[in-house]
Image: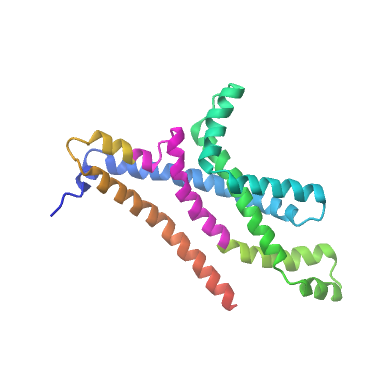
Amino acid sequence: MPDLGIDVLFKGTNAKRLLEGLWVSVRISLISVAISLTLGVVVGILMTKRQKAIRILTRGYLEIVRFMPQMVLLFIVFFGTTRVFGWNLDAEFAAVVVFSFWGVAEMADLTRGALISIPKHQYESAEALGFSGRQTYFLIIVPQTVRRLIPLSINLITRMIKTTSLVMMIGVVEVLKVGQQIIEANRKSSPNAAFGVYATVFVLYFLVCWPISLFAKHLEKKWAVE
């Protein structure tokens, strides 16, 4: 039977360290998602406004995020701003700032799409029934928008968790960084440690993201029927 390098996981506290690294990734993701969901909905609503200045600003923000790789943003925030402004920036804080900046744009675009997908006849029907503009928006439009947004925002969580692997590049000791440390420490005694460690990291990511993805699909099917 080939040596898969799994034995390194049972040396010392390696398994525990991997789980602690996974928690770092999940923690950064959860904080970033919480900020993204809150501010993203607000920005998404602004994107549907007719004021030209607001639309230009929000569209410019969205395009910057779309074309700028997250790693470049990480380097700009963590390495660039610390040199320019001379402040001591925590790597995890920088990661949250970057992923929130990205997540808000993603959530805003989802919110904009959900809002404009509401048929116009619903506005007209509400007006015919005597609803004011505010009542139409908060009693009819917003509930439908939220219902459409929840599965999409849940998928954003899985994307955020997977993308946090980039934070190792700025020194955050997350699960992938811990895996590399374990591989380096056992290079001589376990030459195949890379396979076992990276396979374990894959399984950990899968175990975190898969239930979230299933839940999002469940909501999509349930609400599509209803």
Can the viewer see residue 109 in this picture? yes
Outermost residue, top direction?
86
Outermost residue, bottom direction?
225
Image position of 161 (left or right of 6): right
Q: Position of residue 57 (x, y in %)?
A: 74, 45
Please give the name of the residue rendered at 54% of the width and 43% of the height, measured from the top-left corner. 69
Q: Quadrant of the N terminus?
A: bottom left
Outermost residue, left direction?
1
Q: Position of residue 38 (x, y in %)?
A: 64, 50
Image position of 56 (left or right of 28): right
Q: Is residue 170 magenta?
A: yes
Can the viewer see residue 87 in this picture? no
Q: Position of residue 14 (x, y in %)?
A: 28, 40
Image position of 101 (left or right of 137): left
Q: Quadrant of the C terminus?
A: bottom right
From this view, report whether residue 204 is shown above or below residue 88. Answer: below
Q: Is residue 153 magenta?
A: yes
From this view, report whether residue 226 is shown above or below residue 140. Answer: below
Q: Nearer the viewer, residue 24 or 87?
A: 87
From this view, report whether residue 99 is shown above or below residue 110. Answer: above
Magenta residue span: 152-178
Please give the name of the residue rendered at 56% of the width and 40% of the height, measured from the top-left corner. 98
Q: Position of residue 91 (x, y in %)?
A: 49, 33
Main secondary structure along the magenta-highlighted residues? helix
Outermost residue, front direction?
67
Please give the name of the residue rendered at 70% of the width and 46% of the height, measured from the top-left corner. 60
Please give the name of the residue rendered at 28% of the width and 46% of the height, measured from the top-left corner. 197
